[in-house]
Structure formats: C-alpha cells, structure tokens
Amino acid sequence: MGVDYFSCVRCGETFPDCGDYVSCYCWGVWCSDEYAEKDGFMRPNEDADDSNEESSCKFCREEDVADDALLKHCLKMLDISREDAVANYFGRG
C-alpha cells in the first residue's frame, strides 16, 4: 500500500494522504480545516433530512476560480500566448 501526496490548494504545501487533510468532491484538497474554510468549504449538515447533500467549496459552487484557470481564460480572451504575456511583463513585447 503506497502513500499519495497532495498539494494544498491554499498554501501550496505538500502533504501525505495518510494524515489529516480536507478534500472536496470537485478537486480541492487542503492541508487544514482553516485553509479549507477560507476557500468556502462546507460540510453537509449531519442533521439535515436530505442525506444526499455533499460537501462543497467556492470552486465547485462556481463562486470563484483558481488562479491558474483564470489566467488561462484571460490569456485566451486577450488572444495572446503565455510567452507573449511574459515578454510584455518585462517590457520586451
């Protein structure tokens, strides 16, 4: 049995799956409850009558988007490549 490692969505630190961490059904994984809550993670209400309720975060509720996905979208909207954006940033474009 192997150990998998994840990268925290909030802080970027890596951590093993054999310890404590928080995950959402969409894709998000966090190294702590604190960071998960900062990204809007909510666990289902254990007392609710609807037992099909799932955990969710601001990403799967489409309230926010990860920075890398937003950058890709913006580059596409501007119709420029990442390389062109880097050159422009350094005044070479």
Image (tube, rainbow, N blue to C red):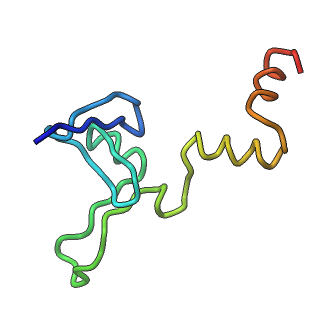
For this view, does 46 lie left or right of residue 35? left
Residue 39 rendering spot, x and y as whole percentages: 42, 47
For this view, does 51 lie left or right of residue 11? left
Residue closest to the eye, 46 or 54 = 54
Looking at the image, how many numbered discs can be counted on the residues? 0
Residue 3 rendering spot, x and y as whole percentages: 17, 37
Residue 89 rendering spot, x and y as whole percentages: 79, 21
Residue 51 rendering spot, x and y as whole percentages: 22, 80
For this view, does 68 lie left or right of residue 55? right
In the displayed structure, 69 sits above or below 59; it is above
Extreme residue toward the right, this view: 93
Image quarter where the N terminus lies is top left
Residue closest to the eye, 71 or 58 = 71
**Residue 62 image-quadrant placement:** bottom right
Extreme residue toward the left, this view: 1
Residue at 76%, 42% in the rendered image: 75
For this view, does 86 lie left or right of residue 22? right
